[in-house]
Amino acid sequence: MLTFTLRRLLLAIPTLLLISAVIFFMVDFAPGSPMADIPLTVPPEVRAKMMAAMGADQPVHIRYVLWLKQFFWNEPLYGIDALFGTDFAQGAQRIISWQSKVPVFQLIGERLPQTLTVVGTAYALGILIALPIGIWSAYRQYSWFDLAGTFFSTMGFSVPTFFTGNLLILIFAVKLGWFPTIYDTNLSITDWDSFYKMVMQMALPVTVLALFNAAEISRYTRASVLENLGQDYVRTARAKGMPERTVLLKHVLRNSLIPVVTIIALGLPTVFGGAIVTEQIFKINGIGAALIGAIHVSDLPVIQTITFIFAVLIVLFNLIADILYGILDPRIRYD
Amino acid sequence: MKMKTLLLGAAAAFALAPAAHAERGADGELKILYYQAVSTLNAYLSSGTKDVEAGSLVLEPLAAFDQDGKLVPRLASEIPTVENGGVAADLTSITWKLNPGVKWSDGSDFTAEDVIFTWQYCTDPNGGCAQGAKYEGVKSVEAVDPLTVKVTFDAPKPYPYQPFTGATAPILQKAQFANCLGTAAATCTEQNSKPIGTGPYMVTDFKVNDVITLDANPNYRDPAKPAFAKVTVKGGGDALAAASAVMETGEFDYAWNTQINPEQQAQMEAGGKGTFVNAFGTLVERIEINMTDPSPALPEGERSTIKHPHPIFSDAKVRQALSMAIDRNVLVEVGYGKAGRPTCNLVPAPAYQASDNTACLTQDIEGAKKLLEEAGWVDTDGDGIREKDGKKFSILYQTSVNAVRQDFQALVKGWWNEIGIEVELKSIDPGVYFGGDAASPDTFQKFYADVEMYANNFDGTDAEPYMAQYLCDKIPGPENQWQGENINRFCDPAYDALFKTLATATGDEARGTIVKQLNDMLTKDTNTILPLVDRGRFSAKANTLDGFIMNSWDSELWNVADWHRVK
């Protein structure tokens, strides 16, 4: 197992380098200019100077090499400095956003808490809703509960979040006035009152996202449980006179969860990546909103860095999913 | 009983009236929404309106523009003029007297050194200053004494008020920004997001592209202001959601730039929690006519260059017919509602330089048809499209991707079809269209189309740099990487000669007369530019907010120190 992990980690290095190059060049060659958003009143000479000051006039391969150095060397140094109060970085050049002139990692640091709270809660809630639905739907296949569950998950999966999000805002925030429509980033939980406010402002976006997540995971759970229910060991367990409860929750569930856990692990990068559409609708300024904002104004350093971090997370969670599989299922050994 | 109530009410009103303005920080929190979130508070590093305006809560210029476009002193004690001796008789220098006793929010004194430093900061060749144009032609900035600054120009400046005026050219604190000159400018994150200012508020927390928290500046020069103790400037979402947050749900006091269509405007107003406010400046949505041939049959490097005049539009009658066929009132009704008004002028304001040109406001389809016939364009084969010398009247009409612009394209295409012109529409991603990439065929500068639509304006109130865009030597082409501003490739020696007289004219009236003539040459005389809509600023304000005056010449937050709660 250890050699497998090590081998996969080593393999990840060339994979990520290749991904970084593809991302960097693709983003760079996409049409659009960081100057497009600037009023036409700014004369061409001033524009040229602004481009030069950002380093945007350098050839793309030079910017790529510089970005690699900043990402893999300078930024980790700043990270160590921030953690231990050292000064290894000594003012080395950081990856700086073209639009806001703020280091991209500082931006990510400011955005991550919102994304983790909202998208993370929604993911956890989604799993909590999905598992019971999936299990019971499979156990009582073709019952009215199963049909309702199927209807619910098809709806949840096929109705886009920008529709459900706006619908919920219109009904519960604008018409009924129960919830705020704009997420307050500065709200910190200090007492019951602020906790209540936090719950209220998270309620709508979390509902939208949790429904979406639950729809997907419940289908996987149902399929997996169904498959296991038909296995020989289930019949054996029943023949031994075990109560249905034990059969379902001990034997079947454990075995069924193996693929589900993998699916959940593979979905985790999206928790860090944020939900671009939902964040935009509920004015939660998280990572997803930062990414879409940067795309709008061609803020290439931000787009490239955030997209690459997603890539790193996806590679990492793929590896974690594989390892988890090995741990959960003794039949699978990678050596 | 009734009388008693009235008297009591009157007494209460008297008792409360002075309190409404008397105390700093008495009105609690002010919540402002800029749906395009604020990226930096340093106007010199970003020319985005949202950044410049948010910065104006903290940083102040020597003089600001009021709602009529007139300069009002801020950090200066008066506006220098030739009459009061502030502007040299030969127009080569301007001397600003600073307000005595002004302090930065950290308690230190504001002096002439800060003004000089600001000029050095923006003119550093490696700084990439976004407001470089404000300081163009400035030879030196010197301190005559700690409270007097002399700005010398390298040539006579009939309009010497560009440097240090308006929200786009505020004064930075030397002590704070001393290490941020040149290439270091972008690395000064702390300074750019929390500048120390002289304005009514000071930053306490800044979250990039998200939310800014500000407190009343304890050292603000008027001890009774500002009325709000705290300001939150939130970002995110879109114009419709921003309007809704003020007008329908009442979560915010003020939402900037709530440009939504007339139908949505009415729906929001029904919410009853706020009102829309508008003010008209110089932003004009227009159709530009290409005076050169954009034909793809021409070799690359010669398309849309002065080598080949436009085969159809070289005839002034044809251009006039295009203008006459458009119903500008309908365009406003469909696209802008209260946020726009029809115009025939390139320079629609301020009043002293706006021409009284209104002929284009009435649509005249028959007249347009007649003009085309006079010009020799007749539909000979009965297919509804006019021809001349075997060539069909068929044109390409391009603009950026934008809901209102696509509506406009469809409407204008309908009217032009009606007078026998075939119109092909094209819409380009705004990032490409306005991106200025010399390698792209789709930039508005390259103009590989017969007509194109966009909006433009000028900074401040003086139109001289704006009119300079239409000089012969500003024509974009391959030799200048397509960077000129004369998009139409308009070239008229008479225009160039008249423009030169602007360099020696002083005073609003004399300058205004010349600008009017220049404006008419481009619009009603030649129809090179077809102005459509004068687009105003359009924002939403809560009914509980008072003291607000909409301004289209400076930051919309220009008088935020006077804002207060309705009592």
Image: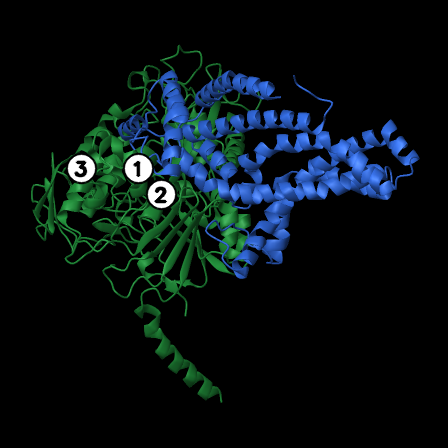
Chain colours: A blue, B green
Q: Is residue A248 visible?
A: yes
- The answer to whether tags 2 and 3 share a subunit is yes
Residue matched to label 1: B45
**Image coordinates for residue B472, horizontal then vertical, percent:** 26, 24
Give the mark, 1 or 3, whose residue is nearer the N terminus: 1
Q: Residue A167 location, x and y as percent?
A: 64, 47
**Tag 3's secondary structure?**
helix
Residue B444 visible in image: no
Q: Tell me the crowding category of disc 1: few under 14, some 14 to 19, or many 20 or more residues within 10 angstroms, Cα based.
A: many
Query: Residue A45: where, in percent of width, then height?
Result: 26, 28
- Which label sits on residue B120? 3
| Circles 1 and 3 in contact, beta carbons < 8 Å | no
Left or right? Give the position of B390 relative to B350. right
Q: Please, what secondary structure does the residue beneath circle 1 have?
A: loop
Disc 2 to disc 3, C-alpha distance = 21 Å
Residue at the spot 59% in from the left edge and 46% down from the top edge: A205
Of the two numbered discs 2 and 1 on the same chain, state the one appearing first in sequence: 1
Q: Is residue A144 above or below residue B31?
A: above
Q: Between marks 2 and 1, how big is the CA–CA gap?
A: 9 Å
